[in-house]
Amino acid sequence: MNTTRLQGVFTPNIVPLDERGEIHEAELRRYVDWLIERGVHGLYPNGSTGEFTRFTVEERYRIIEIIADQTRGRVPILAGAAEANTRETIKACEHYHDLGVRAVAIVSPFYYKLSAAGVYAYFKEIADNSPVDVTLYNIPMFASPIDVPTVRRLADECERVVAIKDSSGDLPHMMRMIAAVRHARPEFSFLTGWDAALMPMLLIGCDGGTNATSGVVPEIMRKLYDLTIERRLDQALDLQYRVLTLFDAMIYSSEFPEGFRAALRLRGVKTGVGRQPQSNVQQMQLSELS
C-alpha cells in the first residue's frame, strides 16, 4: 500500500477517435501532454467520461498502455479497471499494476443492482487479490450505490482500499463518509466527481476531484483547486460559479459525455465522433453548443 494520498485534480480524459472510430493514438498522446502542461495533478483514463463501456477489454488495456507510456511518470495515473466481473477486474488490476499506475478506480457492480452486502463482497474479493491500490467509485446513477457503512467496513478491513471517488454530488453523503473513515485511516483519500461542487467538497475535507470539466479547461480547474486550498475563497467562489455554468452547458446540452467531447474540439483537440450513434436531436444540441 502506498501511503501517499491521491490529491488534486485528476482528469477523466476523453479518448480521441479517428475517422474510422478507432483510438487515435497520436492525438491521445498529444492530449496527455496538453493536460499535463496545463497543470492537472493526475490522469484518470477509462472512467465514465472516457466511455470505458464502449471499448473492448483490449482497447481499455491499450488506452492505459498509451497513457502510461506518454506520461512517463510526470503525474500519477488512476486507471479505471472496472470490468463486468471480479475475475476480469482483477486481471485488469494486475495488468495496470505492471504498467506502473498509482491506483485503480473500480465502479461498483453495474447492470445488476446489488444490495449493500453484495457491493461489499464484490469489492472485498477484488481488494484481497489486487496487487495495486484500489479506489472505490460510487456513481449511483449508473451502478449499485456504495453506502457509508460499506465504505467504512472496506476501509477497516482492506489495506488495499485507499480512496473513494464519489460522483453523486451529495455533499452530506461525502461528509458522512469522511466522518466515518478519516479518524481510523488518515491517509484515505476522498475525491469528488461532481464538478459543480468542487470548492465546497474541498472545504469539507475532500482531497481533490476527478472532474470531466478538467479535460476541457484543465487550467481553470487547477486554478479553482489552488484558490480553494489557499483559502482565497472570494475568488474561488466566483470561479466555481463560472465552472458551474460551463459544466451545466456541457453535461445537460447533450447525452453524456458528448457535450464534453464537443467542447474539447473547440479547444483544438481532434476528438472525433463518439461511438454512440447520434440522434437528430443530439446533433442539433451539439451544434448549438458549438
Image (cartoon, rainbow, N blue to C red):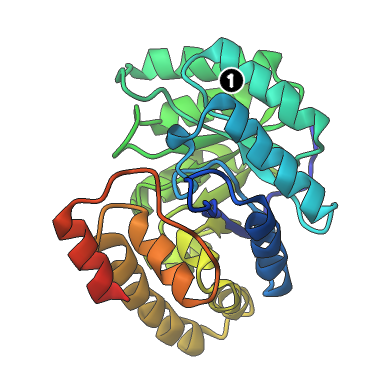
Position of residue 78 relative to residue 245, above or below, is above
- Quadrant containing the C terminus in the rendered view: bottom left
- Residue type at numbered disc 1: Thr
In the image: residue 65, left or right of residue 236: right
Helix, strand or loop at mark 1: helix
In the image: residue 68, left or right of residue 271: right
Question: Which residue was labeled with disc 1?
Answer: 89
Position of residue 12 relative to residue 186, above or below, is below
Residue 152, image x and y in percent? 52, 29
Is any atom of residue 41 visible in this view?
no
State the residue at coordinates (32%, 35%): 142
State the residue at coordinates (51%, 46%): 178
Q: Residues within 10 Å of mark 1 (few under 14, many from 20)?
A: some
State the residue at coordinates (43%, 82%): 237
Closer to the camera in the image, 79 or 160: 79
Residue 30, located in which quarter of the rendered image? bottom right
Figure label count = 1
Residue at the outermost left position: 281
Residue 32, image x and y in percent? 68, 60
Residue 221, located in which quarter of the rendered image? bottom right
Residue 198, image x and y in percent? 46, 65
State the residue at coordinates (28%, 45%): 277
Is any atom of residue 272 visible in this view?
yes
- Quadrant containing the N terminus in the rendered view: top right
